[in-house]
Amino acid sequence: MIAILVLLGLGALFGLFYYLNSKTPVPEGCEDLTAECEGCKITSCAHNPVLKQSKGENKE
């Protein structure tokens, strides 16, 4: 019974924090952030230049 109450409490906290986070305004200057990376070994990263080249986008 205690385990169920703990899990329900954690779920309620997660829901509350998720709601409060969605209500928080984005700070000025952070609206349109892009990663300025040259690429790394993580090819599944959305900012990796390899993915941009395969989609037909060029960085230069």
Image (cartoon, rainbow, N blue to C red):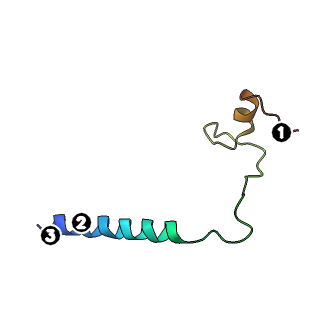
Image position of 43 (left or right of 9): right
Query: Which comes sooner in the sequence, label 2 or label 1?
Result: 2
Assign a secondary structure to mark 1: loop
Quarter of the image for the C terminus: give it: top right
Nearest to N terminus: mark 1 or mark 3: 3
Amino acid type indicated by mark 3: Ile
Quadrant in the picture for residue 39:
top right
**Residue pictured at 43% horizontal, 67% vertical:** 19
Disc assigned to residue 8: 2
Check disc 3 and report its element: helix, strand or loop.
helix
Say whether disc 3 or disc 2 marks the residue closer to the N-terminus: 3
Residue depicted at 73% across the width and 52% down the height: 35
Q: Nearer the viewer, residue 6 or 30?
A: 30
Callout 2 environment at 10 Å: few (<14), some (14 to 19), or many (20+)? few
Indicate which label's residue lies in the foreground, 3 or 2: 2
Distance between the Cα atoms at labels 2 and 1? 47 Å
Residues at marks 1 and 3, CA–CA distance in whole angstroms: 55 Å
Q: Residues within 10 Å of mark 3 (few under 14, many from 20)?
A: few
Residue 34, horizontal then vertical, whole percent: 73, 53
Type of the residue with mark 1: Lys
Residue 59 got which mark? Answer: 1
Foreground residue, 59 or 32?
A: 32
